[in-house]
Amino acid sequence: MVRLVAFLVGLFFSGMLLLGLGDTVIKAIQEPEQPTAEHEFHETPLAVSFAHDGPFGKFDRGQLQRGLKVYSEVCAACHSLNLVAFRDFAALGYNEEQVKALAKAWKTEVPSINPETGEAATRPAIPADKIPSPFANEVAARAANNNALPPDLSLITKARADGTAYVYSLLMGYRNQAGYKNAEGKELLKEFPEAATAPGLHFNPWFANLNIAMADPIAGDDQVTYDDGTKATKQQMAKDVSAFLAWTAEPKMENRKSAGWAALGFLIIFTVLAWMSYRTIWADKKH
Amino acid sequence: MSFPWAQEYKPQGTVSKWVDERLPLPRLVYNAVGAGYPVPRNLNYFWNFGVLAGVALVIQIVTGIILAMHYYASVDGAFNSVEHIMRDVNSGWFIRYAHMNGASFFFIVVYIHIFRGLFYGSYKAPREMIWLLGVTIFLLMMATAFMGYVLPWGQMSFWGAQVITGFFSAIPLVGEPLRQWLLGGFAPDQAALNRFFSLHYLMPFVIAGVIILHVWALHIPGSSNPTGVSVKSEQDTVPFHPYYTAKDGFGLGIFLIFFVAVTFFAPNMLGHPDNYIPANPLSTPAHIVPEWYFLPFYAILKAFTVDFGIPFTGIIIIEAKLMGVLAMFGSILLLFFLPWLDTSPVRSGHYRPLFRKFFWFGLIPCIVLLTYCGGKPPYAQWVILSQIAAAYYFAHFLIILPIVSRIERPLPLPNSITEAVTGKPLETAAA
């Protein structure tokens, strides 16, 4: 009885799936899926390497400090970093006084109240504060940005596939759409005339739908002046800020890797000993 | 019950004797995983995975309890509380990554454990009850993992909850009210998050309870073995301790090396980047995909594309969506009937030439294909492959297996485990 019912159920499910298969094949032949501009012209991230890559990689402190400078002078105009506190900047190699100074000098102040009247006010940031958002709320952010919402950048390199390379590629990826060709030599506007970038958007083939609301934030060289004398080329700035955002997304990465090697070392010794005791105990038993 | 030659627990010293007479817990442990449990001597490394699954559960419970001390189940605070754990709690990043990857490794070892059972016929008499309890544990694990994935309240958490609870709305008439009752609202929100947290904390202990039954049921007939031949004498077995504690210790080391390598060096490899974006009910992700361990079932769900009805009348009896949901649950529930679908008296796939072909060239590629297609967007080529693989999946268990059991001529079995291992016949006189 079980087998008869099973047979009928199996026949039903498999039969419906095969019917569906026929249906899918017929539909695929009758109306083949049309290639889309996103599908044909969306680029995979550029190859770029960082000091913190790989199982032994450590952050380059100098690069993180430069990246912070790019963030604070360029990105911070629109993008919040609300999971990062000023005190966390100690990990970039700043001492306590420098962290205090960084917090105090931050362009946006922290929302507060007037201690006398209780009215809304702002005060300079202290190390314990999270980085203040450039906008009071989402409505304000959208109103200032043509109704687009600049995402918080704290986790951006973890929230995108291949995140650090993605951020770098996006910053380097603004192109002139007229006459743009992909690696195969196909011209975007000839293949997909309707894909022309709408007003208020900016063409960038590294963005998922090719058109991003953010204008090219790093327009050219020397937009910031690095304290360590590094030449601030566009590529240098893009790379430094990407590394900085890799740090904001995972400030404990170095602890993770060093703890990982310790754990692996311990486990390899444990496993060798376990193997030896296994061989010893089983020595007299054929199995 | 055990074999008559099982070693007996002999308490040493007055304290042990005192305890043994009042609460013989050490005796229970001795007989369960100590020298008092005789186990076939020929178990291969596939038999390590039951113990490994138990270890994985313990890792999940320990890390989970610590996470719960810092986690905050609120739609406004959950996401940030997880990041607080990652950034500010001492070694919180380790606890969180271990829990997140521990779930994946729990499923990896349980899947290997299930495949071991499927290939070596561990579900057959007299071990049906062990199998039924095992499938129950698997279902409980799936529910626990799903609810756990919702807790960080990222984009995939929210939309995963939306999709999975949406299955219930496929049920005719009562579907939508049922869904709202389960969620405590029209969409996943504070009520749903709170109850998922509560249940996610409860269910691992339910799983632990069913595992106790699973191991109890195992100790009635004793462990199966790669030949599938029943234990005949003392020569066929070794005491669990020290023989299998030593072997399991080695297996545990290898397992932990893999677990640690992923947890410390590629902790986000098995996750989805979208779950690092806070949940936003107003923005649907481009592709909603579940965690990798649900992909084969997700592929089955999506493979049903035509309604079942009376041809040429337009009358629909079962909609495609409902059928997908039924089939998805059915694909797991059918495992409950496996002991009665596979009627071959031979347990081990080693001695079943026809079964073995369908297993390695049918079932395994079909599940690999379903896992792969489950993570793909619904383009025709992936739908076609899922439909072929899903059709085979149901046919394999419900049609092919019962027929194979009937028509197959198994290879000759060894007379005993000892003979299979040593090549010499069992000396019955010595036993």
Image (tube, rainbow, N blue to C red):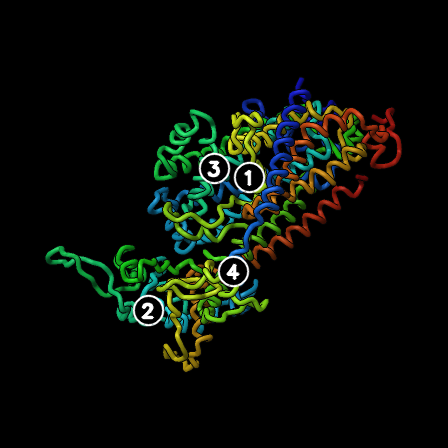
- Identify the residue at horizontal 29%, vertical 59% (top origin): A141
Query: SS class of the residue under badge 1?
Result: helix
Residue in front for this viewpoint, A17 or B118:
A17
Q: Is residue A204 above or below residue A279?
A: below
Give the quarter of the image for residue B105.
top right
- Distance of label 2 from label 3 (alpha carbons): 46 Å
Residue in front for this viewpoint, B102 or B161:
B161
Q: Is residue B166 above or below residue A235?
A: above
- Distance of label 2 from label 1 (alpha carbons): 53 Å
Mark 1 falls within which chain? Answer: B
Question: In the picture provided, is B254 more to the left or to the right than A41?
Answer: right
Residue B66 position within the rendered picture, expressed as x and y whole percent measured from the top left: 44, 44
For the residue marked with disc 2, what is the amino acid? Val
**Do the residues at discs 4 and 1 belong to one chain?**
no
Farthest residue to the top: give it.
A1
- Identify the residue at horizontal 48%, vertical 61% (top origin): A163
Question: In the picture provided, is B137 more to the left or to the right than A251?
Answer: right
Question: Residue under circle 1?
Answer: B302
First-in-chain label (1 vs 3): 3
What is the crowding at mark 3: few (fewer than 14 residues within 10 Å), some, or many (at least 20)? Answer: some
Q: Is residue A263 visible?
A: yes
**Do the residues at discs 2 and 4 belong to one chain?**
yes
Q: Are marks 4 and 1 in contact (CB under 8 Å)?
A: no
Question: Residue under circle 3?
Answer: B164
**Which of the two marks, 1 or 3, is nearer to us in this view?**
1
- Identify the residue at horizontal 67%, vertical 35% (top origin): B392
- Distance of label 3 from label 4 (alpha carbons): 28 Å
Question: Residue under circle 2?
Answer: A99
